[in-house]
Amino acid sequence: MQTKFIFVTGGVMSGLGKGVVTSSIAKLLQLSNQRVSCVKIDPYLNYDAGTMNPVAHGEVYVTDDGGECDMDIGNYERFLNQNLKKTHNITTAQIYSSVIEAERRGEYLGACVQIIPHITDEIKKRIHKIAEDEKLDFLVVECGGTVGDIESLPFLEALRQMRLEEGPQSVLFVHVTLAPSLDVVGEQKTKPTQHSVQELRRIGIQPDFMAVRCTEPLLESTKKKISMFTNVTASDVFSCHDVPSIFSVPQILYEQGIVDKIFTKFAKVGMINSAANWDKWNGIVQSMQHKDGEIKIAMVGKYVTLADSYVSVNHALKHAGAKIGKSVSIDWIDSEGINGNVDTLSKYNGILVPGGFGSRGVEGIIKTANYAREKNIPYLGICFGFQLAAVAFGRYVLNYSDANSTELDPNTTHPVVDLLPEQKTLSNLGGTLRLGAHNITIKPNTIASKTYNADHVSRRHRHRYEINTKYLHEFEKNGLVFSAESDNSKRMEMLEIPSHKFYFGVQFHPEFNSRPGFPEESFEAFIRASAS
Ligand code: GLN
């Protein structure tokens, strides 16, 4: 069996939704019973997304195997309802590090080490390895950045070579661009698209398909014009117009015949009737749109200026809302501003504190966690939100006025949250947190065991600090229960206040396990409590 490759490039500008086009194409192939996966190439020089600021770059998406990945990996996982390995996020730094390490080991036998062929070979090797290891029918590879960027050149070159080596019957290029309309009359402009395809062709890539972002469906006349200037058949120019939900994009591409065209291009016969798959998927997409009442959630944190910083949390809340037929509206509230006026939170049905690092805005979060407890408002604390709920409880119930996490106050006399012991000797910040999926044991007869309906669960982590088990007894004596643990009770994983309407915290990141149609359990329980 030979894997077919679909390479997705982008032109004109970033933020066009290349990730959604990539995921949608993969989804359509999966619905056609093909074994499919996605890869994201990130041409930046960071080794991974772990050290990047979420306000500038969006959330760091954690995979089961502990990869700190670009948030597009999250899109792929949600669309495909499939877990991906960290090898599916390739960066310039990873490629160059392996080549340089191989050079130091003397593996190039005296050759002059160059971008072509050594860097491009390493890129191709990684793509092939994924295809072979996972025995894929299709691998959809998204090349980040915009055509014309210096950083992405070696990657595009590697993809060009793959087309030459594998042949046109095995490789297909999709180029995503924008056709902006400048006025209400809405003439769709094609010049930016023309230029970006010229740029692509200059480096030797002729796209097979065009996926054109536009507000209204692409007019026939626009398609013809794009076709003429880009040398792509008009029927292979696809309209990616605005739709209410990203999960409707597979449908609009399907209606334009993209699946048939992909199968025809690859001379693949025997497309499998996928009506049952489609029914299931459509059911999920529709449930995401059907709304009967609204639940208002306050999300209090520090990276609130960019919606993408918590994109998986936002999705998870919507998945949970859809499950009970309600829409969820989310207000992002900067914890720095909340300090003196936590009462503004009274209008919300639920309060969520997501993950975070560092001390800015932290006092506002601690007050928020305490307010939710005192006012009996459903609370879900994730990672930082879990740790700071314990800090709030330490301060306001146990009366340790300086209770804190040593991340925020290394000199506190009551370090209810402290550094993981194995972290104490580390000096590197990249890739050294406690990462990825770990097995968690849940105590019977707790809110946690009811929520998960299981005694074990595996969830993804990304933290450096944890609950200081020295204080467990005191917490529990005063009504806060740690209802799940890991590593033989060494680490606390969930907390709850049984007397509260819903006060729940998790050391892990449940948002990465939530999928359309299958909300993660703690989100579902939180939204149900907020709705009642
Ligand atoms: N800053 C905390 C820690 O390092 C929480 C991390 C997070 O919320 N992802 O443990």
Image: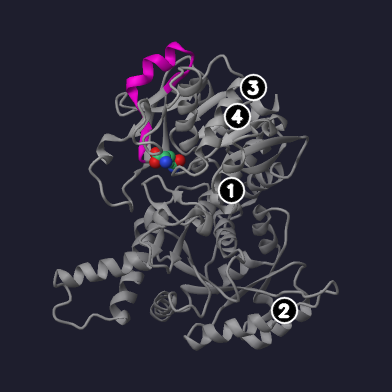
Q: CA distance from mark 3 to mark 4?
A: 16 Å
Task: Please state the extent of the stretch shown in magenta in the rendering.
Answer: 464-483
Q: Nearer the viewer, residue 422 or 243?
A: 422
Magenta span contains residue 466: yes
Residue at the (72%, 79%) spot, across then down: 223
Q: Nearer the viewer, residue 356 or 455?
A: 356
**Residue that carries the numbered disc 3 in the rendered image:** 375
**Residue 274's spot in the image, x, y percent?**
61, 52
Cβ(mark 3) to ligand 1 < 8 Å? no
Q: CA distance from mark 1 to mark 2?
A: 39 Å
Q: Is residue 479 above or below residue 254?
A: above
**Residue 51's spot in the image, x, y percent?**
40, 55
Specify which label sits upstream in the sequence, 3 or 4: 3
Q: Which mark is residue 223?
A: 2
The mark lying in front, picked from 3 and 4, is 3
Q: Classify residue 85 as left or right of residue 230.
A: left
**Residue that carries the numbered disc 1 in the rendered image:** 304
Q: Which mark is residue 345?
A: none
Residue 347 image-quadrant placement: top right
Q: Does the CB distance between marks 1 and 4 fall below 8 Å?
A: no
**Residue that carries the numbered disc 4 in the rendered image:** 526
In this orientation, does residue 169 appear? yes
In this orientation, does residue 316 appear? no
Specify which label sits upstream in the sequence, 1 or 3: 1
Cβ(mark 4) to ligand 1 < 8 Å? no
**Residue 2's spot in the image, x, y percent?**
40, 66
